[in-house]
Structure formats: structure tokens, C-alpha cells
Image (cartoon, coloured by chain):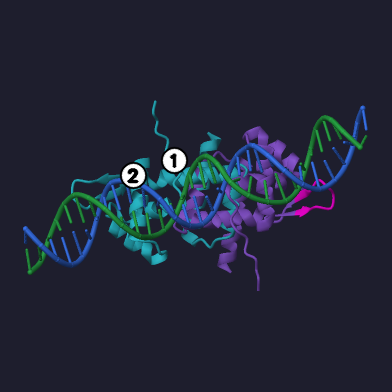
Chain colours: A cyan, B purple, C green, D blue
Amino acid sequence: MSAGKQLKPTESELEILRVLWEKGPSTVREVHEILEQSKDAGYTTTLKLMQIMHEKGLLQRDASSKTHIYAAAVSQENTQRQLLDKMIDTVFNGSASQLVLQALGNHKSSKEELEKIKEYLNEIEKQQRK
Amino acid sequence: MSAGKQLKPTESELEILRVLWEKGPSTVREVHEILEQSKDAGYTTTLKLMQIMHEKGLLQRDASSKTHIYAAAVSQENTQRQLLDKMIDTVFNGSASQLVLQALGNHKSSKEELEKIKEYLNEIEKQQRK
DNA sequence: ATTTGTTTACGAAGATATTCGTATATTCAT
DNA sequence: ATGAATATACGAATATCTTCGTAAACAAAT
């Protein structure tokens, strides 16, 4: 009951989540100063976004001190999975492996990364054989 | 010059593109009847969307007969790549292999698909060794 | 030729996302 | 305590996306 399914963050919200995942709990100003480096928006814009995200349950905040501290309330992994699943569904017609082939084809991956992927594939196949 | 970089289709636009990729050039009504199966929207909504997509250059149309025939003006592959690249960038911090691992982890892939992926990995590694 | 049905064109309402101006509250240094 | 700096709260303007009502154009059947 009341599973509280996570709702999809918007573009701007994702930018904020990325900062918080990276830097951990932060003030609006801290987040804003990071965002300013790549885009230009006013301080109150960032503030408003983070307030909305808090209402939506995407962020939690500690309001005990005057300057509130915000933290991501959703995990990076869950969010990645959620967005990825949706993309597989709506863009790749449900075929995860088709997406994988595209991803591998168009991006340089290091030898180590490729090895990791291969190992993972072997594991999956072992599982399947059982 | 005027490279005409493809702009990102919206959610609804993607639904329409998927129909056209699948069925080839079609009338608004044909597209609409497919969409109706999964969502409910009026006919003129579909029409309007397709007209806008035409203006944007996402669709081309043959208006020689009374009933116009629309076709995708962007390829499925290019669009997939575009959206995938963006996701790798904004959701997976630029790491394609991290996305691949997530995708493989959370989705059942057939043995054949996994084999195909492994072959592909081997090829990539061969290339790298040269 | 008139009716009936289907199509496109147009404009605008509704919904959601983004942006920011301004007011109010709080803190801190003087 | 007063002023300067910084924070939050609130409301609204703007932009974008989605939806649909209505009118005009056209085609086919009667």
C-alpha cells in the first residue's frame, strides 16, 4: 500500500539530483554554484526547483538551521534504472540488447570496462544454464 | 552549413515516429488508429502533432492527394543514438559501460542476444589490439 | 445540388516545466 | 539596535507540450 512510486524527474531536476549524488547533502547556494558553471539561471530559480522537488519527495531537507540542507531522497541507481527502463521500452521497442549494441558501438570504452562487461555476460549465461 | 541538426522529439512525437517506422508512410487516420489502442486522444490531436512535426522537419509529407501521406524524416537509428547519447551523458555521467551493465542486469535477454553482444565485444577488443 | 462524412487548418485552452521579481525572515557584524 | 547580507516563501510571467473545438475545403453518395 502507498508504495510511493518514484516519479520521473524532469531535465532540470535531474541536474540537481546529479549534484547532490556527487556532493552529498548541500545547501541551495552550493548546488546553485555548481549549476552556474554549466548553465545560467538565477539563484531563486534553483531554490524554487529544489523546493518543488522536496514537495514531490525527490529531495529531503533539514530545516533545523536557518540555511536548509537538501539531500537526494531517491537513489542514483533507482533513478537510472527507471529512466533506462523507460528508454528501452519507448525507444528500443523493449529490446535491452539492441540498446546495448548501440551503446557499445558509439562509445569508446576502456579495455577494463569491456572486460567487466564480458565477465558479467559469462555470469549471466552460467545462471541461465542452471 | 545548415547541417540541420535533428532536434529531440518529445514523448508524443516519439510515439508517432514509432508507428511510422514500423508501418511506413501512412495517413493521419492510420497513425491515429494505432495510437488509439494504447492511449486515448482525439483525431485532431494526432493531426496537430503530425503537422507540427512536419514543420519541425521530423516528418515529411506528400500532399498531392487530398489525404496527406506522412513519413518519418529522421531515421530510427539516428534518433535512438541521439537519445541514447543524451542519456549516457546526463544520467550515467558519460559512462556507456555503466549503462550497459545496468541494462544487462535488469532485463532478461535471450541466449542468442547475449551471444551477439559477446561477439561484438570480441570484435571491439580485436580492433583495439591493432 | 444537397447532404453526409472525412480531411486539413487554425486558434486557443489546459497542463506542465522553467524562470524570476519581490516580500519577508533571519543572521551577523557593527 | 541598526544595517547589510543572505535565506526562504510566494506568486506570477514565460515557455513548451498537449489537447481539442470549430470552421473551411473537399469527396462521395443520394
- Give the image location of residue C14, x and y in percent: 52, 39
Residue B64 image position (x, y, % from top left): 84, 53
Label 1 close to label 2 by CB (< 8 Å):
no
- When the figure is inspected, residue A97 is found, relative to residue A40, above or below; the finding is above
Name the chain under label 2: A
Which numbered disc covers residue A7?
1
- For disc 1, the chain is A
Identify the main secondary structure in magenta.
loop
* Earlier-in-chain disc, 1 versus 2: 1
Label 1, secondary structure: give it. loop
B28 within the magenta span: no
Q: Are marks 1 and 2 on the same chain?
A: yes
Q: Which secondary structure, mark 2?
A: helix
Query: Which numbered tag is attached to residue A54?
Result: 2
User: As rendered, which of D1 and D6 lies closer to the eye?
Assistant: D1
Q: Can residue B118 be seen in this view?
A: no
Residue farthest toward the bottom in the current orientation of the protein = B1
Percent position (x, y) of residue B112? 64, 43
Left or right of residue B61: residue A124: left
Depth check, front residue: A89 or D15: D15
Q: Nearer the viewer, residue D24 or B41?
A: D24
In the rendered image, which quarter is residue D7 located in? bottom left
Q: How far apart are marks 1 and 2 (CA)?
A: 12 Å
How packed mark 2 is, by other alpha carbons closer than 10 Å (few <14, some 14-19, many 20 or more), is: some
Of the two numbered discs 1 and 2 in the rendering, the one whose residue sits closer to the viewer: 2
Q: Is residue B69 magenta?
A: yes
Q: Tell me the kind of residue under disc 1.
A: Leu
Tell me if B51 is positioned left or right of A45 in this view.
right
Could you tell me which quadrant the N terminus of chain A lies in?
A: top left
* Vertical arrangement, residue A90 with respect to residue B61, above or below: above
State left or right for residue D14 relative to residue D5. right
Q: What stretch is highlighted in magenta?
A: B61-70
